[in-house]
Image (cartoon, coloured by chain):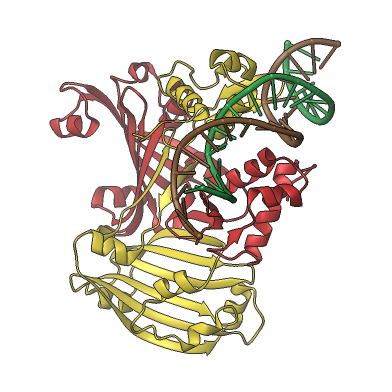
Chain colours: A red, B yellow, C brown, D green
DNA sequence: AAGTGGTCTAGACCACCAA
DNA sequence: TGGTGGTCTAGACCACTTA
């Protein structure tokens, strides 16, 4: 899988990983002490330590002082999910991508929004509702709010030519994002836009993006059931 | 947040992280060279290197030889998702948990299943369909297939008392899991079990679990729309 | 071609925890 | 209380890349 030479600590890491995968060192098993591995691979302890630390960070090994280093029982609880960039996903599927603004409005946040955004009363927000099309067919309905207190520049930006997601990604630094994924039945207005019957099942993705000042933006995206499958994986392989 | 003393490389790591979060070192910015940081923190290069390596592994920094170390533009593409353990989720929500088997059958895999499982023709599979209840109400419908070529013991296990998910987790080591998440409209038979109307929106979670021998099990789980919201997050904070 | 990160060493002392 | 991992040092040489 990997090209070129592996460094020594990588060789050690992959060797340990291979033994775990092959069940030579099953979950719960204590692997050799660092000083034993140091002799086995004829290297310094720092190098062995680096290999093991990497596997510990990946949740594959666990260290206990005085006891040794152990193989962890894998759990399903955490996996890495890939959140798609809609435009890229459509283009990579070989479809044409088009984007249109359905609605854009600057307004003052409601009291409810202010408490959700944890910002002062009277904070202004830019609301943008847009549609992503694949091969001329509606693919995703997007309702976004941009916090003008954090991103004042958004007010002077032309979102008719640049989708807000792209503009925000390149212009506004953020440090945290929270996603919520659920299923729902489409309301009449959104169903009409998708040209399907009211109540059709859809996937709903909500995302809030933060930086040190506060919430930058939050967005609701809706996809018809057959159009989007999210994938998440957990693997002992591949760092 | 963290108790006890931080080691030097942790102090350095958190200091760098803080500066990035505070936008003192914005995305794209080159942070000081390792040799400069070594002077700043009055420590050896290995220690600085360890702090930076950790941030590189977290996707926050990027190293370029001869050029330096740079702050990465965050992307939404990867997040960590928490895949719920149904029983625990129900209990933690303060509901009573109950579990019932609707159907159990040992059979030979279809040709289609064999190609999906990448196993020999005639491989046997144990099929278990079950229902998880919260406060007496159907919460999740689960259809599971267990590969008896990989887990022969499953045949002699009583799944009427132990849910297969629990038994498998503690008895069968695995190394990889793949999840697919989508929305769908319930078919009549499943809708009847949930006592909702046919076509109601539901969240569908599919998981395949592997080890070095092959696919251990795969499971389809269905949740009513309002019953499950999956959460995923990406954050510069917290290692 | 120069300077960055990448790696590695052969020690050392310490903190913790199980025996 | 002994042995484990946790951390750190003060060097060294190498590989890569970009200026």
Tell me: residue A144, above or below residue A201. Answer: above
* Quarter of the image where one finds residue A128: top left
Q: Residue at x 61, y 47 (%)?
A: A52
User: Residue B114: image x %, image y %?
Assistant: 61, 78
Give the side of residue D7 with respect to residue A41, left or right.
left
* Residue A138 in sight in this render: no
Give the side of residue A189 with respect to residue B212, left or right.
left
* Residue A113 in sight in this render: yes
Q: Residue at x 44, y 85 (%)?
A: B157
Give the side of residue B67 with respect to residue B99, left or right.
right
Screen quadrant of the N terminus of chain B: top left
User: Residue C2: image x %, image y %?
Assistant: 79, 10
User: Residue B182: image x %, image y %?
Assistant: 41, 59
User: Residue A51: image x %, image y %?
Assistant: 65, 45
* Quarter of the image where one finds residue A215: top left
Q: Residue at x 44, y 30 (%)?
A: B6
Residue nearer the viewer, A231 or A139: A231
Give the side of residue D14 with respect to residue B130, left or right.
right
Tell me: residue A91, above or below residue A202. Answer: above
């Amino acid at each position: 899988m990997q090209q070129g030479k592996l460094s020594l600590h990588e060789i050690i890491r992959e060797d340990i990983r291979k033994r775990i995968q092959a069940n030579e060192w099953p979950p719960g098993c204590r692997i050799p002490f660092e000083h034993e591995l140091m002799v086995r691979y004829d290297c310094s302890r720092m190098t062995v330590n680096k290999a093991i630390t990497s596997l510990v960070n990946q949740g594959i090994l666990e260290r206990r002082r005085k006891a040794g280093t152990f193989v962890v029982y894998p759990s399903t609880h955490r996996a890495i999910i890939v959140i798609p960039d809609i435009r890229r996903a459509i283009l990579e599927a070989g479809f044409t991508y088009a984007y249109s603004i359905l609605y854009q409005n600057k307004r003052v946040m409601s009291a409810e929004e202010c408490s959700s955004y944890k910002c002062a009363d009277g904070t202004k927000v830019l609301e943008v509702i847009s549609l992503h099309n694949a091969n001329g067919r509606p693919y995703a309905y997007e309702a976004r709010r941009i916090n003008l207190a954090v991103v004042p520049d958004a007010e002077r930006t032309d979102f008719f030519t640049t989708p807000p997601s792209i503009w925000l990604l390149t212009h506004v630094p953020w440090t945290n994002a929270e996603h919520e994924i659920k299923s729902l039945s489409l309301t009449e207005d959104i169903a009409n836009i998708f040209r399907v019957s009211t109540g059709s099942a859809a996937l709903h993705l909500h995302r809030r993006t933060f930086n040190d000042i506060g919430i930058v933006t939050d967005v609701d995206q809706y996809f018809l059931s057959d159009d989007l499958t999210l994938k998440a994986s957990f693997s002992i392989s591949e760092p």
